Image (cartoon, rainbow, N blue to C red):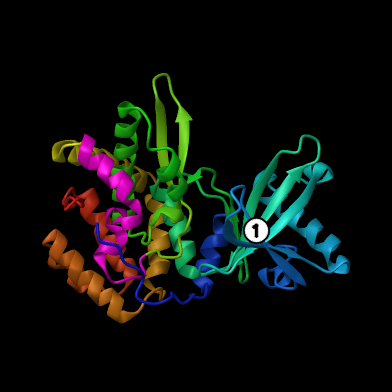
Amino acid sequence: MKGFIPSKKKVPYPINSLLRLYLDQYNREMKLPIAYEDLLRFTTSVSLIDAKGEDTLWETVYYDPADSDELHRALTQIYALLKTDGDTEVLQHLSVARIDFCTFGNTKPFRVRIINRYNDNYDHFYVKRADASRIYGLELEHILSPNRITYLVNENTLIEEHIAGIPGDQFMEHNLGESVFNQIRIAKEFVKFNERCFVRLLGDMRAYNYVVDITPDIEGSQYRIRAIDFDQQSYEGRKSFYLPQYFKENNPIIFLGIEHMTPATVKQYQLEERSLIANRLKGEQGRMNKLFEIMRKDTISTPTKVKQLSKELAAHHNNPKFLQCRNMAEVVLTNLELLVDKDFVQSMR
């Protein structure tokens, strides 16, 4: 499978007033005690090394003692907003164990580790620069996927919950040597994940941009692949960018599918996933209409990329309707309309 990288580093797009009204309506917009920029005031940092002694590409950051206490209080309050709708009772036994910073990625996120002092259990959340296309990606994930997403926005700050699971690259390194039964289930889930990404045009799903959630079952295990990076929501112009099957980093799972599944089986799983997406879309029609009304008036890509993707999808689906699309919102909406009308063309080709 041929791999590729985005043509250029994606530029962030501001959140306009209409999108903010939408976020407020659905309880995503909320006053926060600190902003992303406040976390940039760290005084020193050290590389975060994993248990194998390898660099994680994250840096643990430290702050002046005069700022640290206030910062930690604010971060535990944000965690309470994410998890308990702001109930401050939980603050008594929560503290910030560590703050990590990643310079690798468009949003340059901070990862905050919150620890429960009663039992040493810990959780994480992320503080990022807010970006309109990422917000659209989070909303489409929340509405169209089997996963619910919790996030908060305040001005130019985005707070995201931690999505639990084994990072895709680690999963492929350590968890593919399962029974044939489990390998078939892994391959099946990747087909469904591939379809979800292509239908709603979420790009750049290389192995480190998703996690695998494993649930023990009566026989074997159940698997769900969950995207954790939504920066590339309908931004790039190449159709292949929205198909995880084309990233070389995903080849180990692709090869499992080639070994264990026939084209007819692949098509069955694609049809199952499309049916589920269509049902979710119909169930949230009002919310989707509001979102796309705003998205149509927004800019989340360049005219050149919109034109390229429209042409490639028109050829893929043999449908000239894409050529009339003026922006990425209309491209995504046309893709979804074909899904509902059962005219969506198989992606594994």
Q: Residue 226 at x, y = what percent? A: 44, 47
Say if 180 sits above or below 35 in the image.
above
Magenta residue check for 64: no
Mainly helix, strand or loop, the magenta region? helix
Looking at the image, residue 156 sits to the left or right of residue 202; the answer is right
- In the image, 349 versus 230, the foreground residue is 349
- In the image, 110 versus 25, the foreground residue is 110
Q: Residue 182 at x, y = what percent? A: 35, 30
Q: Residue 347 at x, y = what percent? A: 21, 52
Say if 224 sits above or below 65 in the image.
above
Which residues are the magenta region?
A: 234-260
Q: Quadrant of the N terminus?
A: bottom left
Rate crowding at label 1 as few (under 14), some (14 to 19) or many (20 or more) other CA atoms within 10 Å: some
The residue to which callout 1 is attached is 48
Viewer can see residue 320: yes
Q: Residue 184 at x, y = what percent? A: 29, 33
Label 1's element?
A: strand
- In the image, 278 versus 148, the foreground residue is 148
Magenta residue check for 238: yes
How many numbered marks have been drawn onto this rendered protein structure? 1
Please, which residue is most extreme toward the right here? Answer: 66
Residue drawn at the location 69% of the way across and 51% of the way down = 113
For badge 1, the amino acid type reads Leu
